[in-house]
Image (cartoon, rainbow, N blue to C red):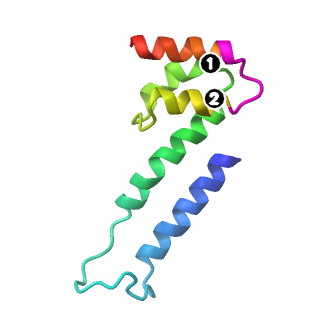
Amino acid sequence: MFSKQIRLLQNLISNLLIAPDYHSFPPSTSNEPLSTATIIQQFEKINEVCMVLQLDKPSDWIAHRYCVKETLSIEEVRSIMLQRVDFPPSVVENVCKSLNKQ
């Protein structure tokens, strides 16, 4: 659900950038089409946070992290995982230690 809301927000912002009635904000002196690449790039980190929050168990991140760009540091992953009350802190610590070794 959370990932769907993030995608909807990302699509809304991207559509606003490329909409034909876009009122040049920020002001642009060229008629070049606007790129949504910067929006997508800005959402990479929040998408990764969403992936961490939706894991079934902390150790799943070891496999999932190869599917993403890894914009989160190990400390950020640890902090995000510890927000989940169903993830035992000791298991989170073990996963993060194994991430350090890789």
Task: Find residue 3 and report its horizontal and vertical position in percent.
Answer: 62, 47
Please tell me which residue lies in front, 97 or 27. 97
Q: Quadrant of residue 20?
A: bottom left
Find the residue positioned furthest to the right. 86
> Is label 2 in a helix, a strand or a loop?
helix
Please tell me which residue lies in front, 10 or 98. 98
Residue located at (39% from left, 13% from top): 102
Q: Residues within 10 Å of mark 1 (few under 14, many from 20)?
A: many
What residue would you read off at disc 1?
92
Question: Is 27 within the magenta?
Answer: no
Relative side of 1 to 69, left or right: right
What residue would you read off at disc 2?
81
Relative side of 76 to 58, left or right: left
Report the magenta residues as a range: 83-90
> Is label 1 in a helix, a strand or a loop?
helix
Relative side of 60 to 17, left or right: right
Residue located at (57% from left, 11% from top): 94
Q: How many callouts does the rendering have?
A: 2
Task: Find residue 55 and report its horizontal and vertical position in percent.
Answer: 64, 28
**Circles 2, 1 touching at the beta carbon (< 8 Å):** yes
Task: Find residue 82 and report its horizontal and vertical position in percent.
Answer: 66, 28
Magenta-colored segment: predominant secondary structure = loop
5 shown above or below 20:
above
Task: Find residue 100 and report its horizontal and vertical position in percent.
Answer: 42, 15
Instruction: Give the mark nearer the N terminus: 2 vs 1.
Output: 2
Q: Residues within 10 Å of mark 2 (few under 14, many from 20)?
A: many
Residue type at the position of mark 2: Met
Residue type at the position of mark 1: Val
Residue located at (51% from left, 19% from top): 62
